[in-house]
């Protein structure tokens, strides 16, 4: 993995999807295609042997935390973790800054999740080891964004001349924020942003996508927005975010197998960063385009 260890990523923080250019994305994807062999143990790679990965989550997580720890282990690293601040010295009054500085002493790289936007970047300014943003409130989730982009890239003809529908809580869904920034690196993409006004993508992100040359349509019409989509990316209502908005406004944004069969392209692909809360019905799991099932497996690669 010499190319990756000598790239601009080596030793760098990963805080925002804005950091990536197309050449770096291509490099990451080339290595991502090799990961299933390592996961299946067809090939052994101990590139992180002797290193310690730190996993520090100040907010709940299942897939991101477990896949991060598994990745460290499969590449030869050991792992130290703090997965609930209620069981840390912060309950005794320790400051966030002191906690981060202390955690950094015990690892070679830190993967941090925090419920407040900007706090992972704050940690990166304190720590003397690289920091990876595993989600900062309603801000970004660049590693999930990369996974979603990779899935779209492989499923939709390398994102050439595709139409994407992004639907749900686009305002506070951090995964879709990172994905939208990454989509700006590609040409010939049309994007339908489907949400009620109260949950629509932030204006600055819409502007960024349009400046990059993407054809962006902002709409609340779910049926019309997904009808011609090559892929549909669903975002759950962010019930764990403040302030609480009337989530019932999102009830009409729901995929069922009958809806897909009657009103969408036969070859449409369906993505979801998970967890889902009802916006994708269970019967969609058997749809041939339900690539979110593949993503579940890919997180372990």
Image (tube, rainbow, N blue to C red):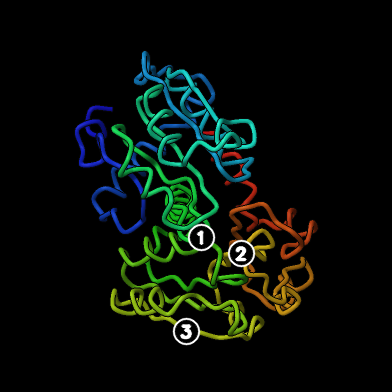
Residue 257 in the image, given as x and y percentages of width and height: 77, 66
Compare residues 255 and 89 and report the one nearer the observer. Answer: 89
- Mark 2–mark 3 Cα distance, whole angstroms, equals 17 Å
Corner quadrant of residue 8 = top left
Q: Earlier in the sequence, mark 2 or mark 3?
A: 3
> Which residue is drawn at the image coordinates 44% and 37% (left, top)?
111
Residue 211 at x, y = what percent?
A: 29, 78
Q: Which residue is mark 3?
A: 217
Instruction: Return the mark for residue 150.
Output: none
- Tell me if mark 1 has few (under 14), some (14-19) or many (20+) residues whose alpha carbon lies within 10 angstroms of its own: many
The relative height of residue 295 versus residue 78 in the rendered view (above or below) is below
- Of pointers 2 and 1, the one earlier in the residue sequence: 1
Dot 3, crowdedness within 10 Å: few (<14), some or many (≥20)?
some
- Nearer to us: label 2 or label 3: 2
Using a 10 Å C-alpha cutoff, classify the residue at mark 2 as few (fewer than 14 neighbours), some (14 to 19) or many (20 or more).
many
Q: Is residue 141 above or below residue 93?
A: below
- As rendered, which of 57 and 17 lies closer to the eye? 57
- Which secondary structure, mark 2? strand
- Badge 1 marks a residue whose secondary structure is helix
Q: Going 55% across and 63% down the picture, which residue do you hit?
A: 173
Q: Earlier in the sequence, mark 3 or mark 1?
A: 1
Numbered label attached to residue 235: 2
Relative to 71, is 241 above or below? below
Q: Residue at x 19, y 33 (%)?
A: 6
Residue 95 lies left or right of residue 59; in this view the side is: left
Q: Which residue is mark 1?
A: 174
- 30 vs 242, left or right, is left
Q: CA distance from mark 3 to mark 1?
A: 20 Å
């Amino acid at each position: 993995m010499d190319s990756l260890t000598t790239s601009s990523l080596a030793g760098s923080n990963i805080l925002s999807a804005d950091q990536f250019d197309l050449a770096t994305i291509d490099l990451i994807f080339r290595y991502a295609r090799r990961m299933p062999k390592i996961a299946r143990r067809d090939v052994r790679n101990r590139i992180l042997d002797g290193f310690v990965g730190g996993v520090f989550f100040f907010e709940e997580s299942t897939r991101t935390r477990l896949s991060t720890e598994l990745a460290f282990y499969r590449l030869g690293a050991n792992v130290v973790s703090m997965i609930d601040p209620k069981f840390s010295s912060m309950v005794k009054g320790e400051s966030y800054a002191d906690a981060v500085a202390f955690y950094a002493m015990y690892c070679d790289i830190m993967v941090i999740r925090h419920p407040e936007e900007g706090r992972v970047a704050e940690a990166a300014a304190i720590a003397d080891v690289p920091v990876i943003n595993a989600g900062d409130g309603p801000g970004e989730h660049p590693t999930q964004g990369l996974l979603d982009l990779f899935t779209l890239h492989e499923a939709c003809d390398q994102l050439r001349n595709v139409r994407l529908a992004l639907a749900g809580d686009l305002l506070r869904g951090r995964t879709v924020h990172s994905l939208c920034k990454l989509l700006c690196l590609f040409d010939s993409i049309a994007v339908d942003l489907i949400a009620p006004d109260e949950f629509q993508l932030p204006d600055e992100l819409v502007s960024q996508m349009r400046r990059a040359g993407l054809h962006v349509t902002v709409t609340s019409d779910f049926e019309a927005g997904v009808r011609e989509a090559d892929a549909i990316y669903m975002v759950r209502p962010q019930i764990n975010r403040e302030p609480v908005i009337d989530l019932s406004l999102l009830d009409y944004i729901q995929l069922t197998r009958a809806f897909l069969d009657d009103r969408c392209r036969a070859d449409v692909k369906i993505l979801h960063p998970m967890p889902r809360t009802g916006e994708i019905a269970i019967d969609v799991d058997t749809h041939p385009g339900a690539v979110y099932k593949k993503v579940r497996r890919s997180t372990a690669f």
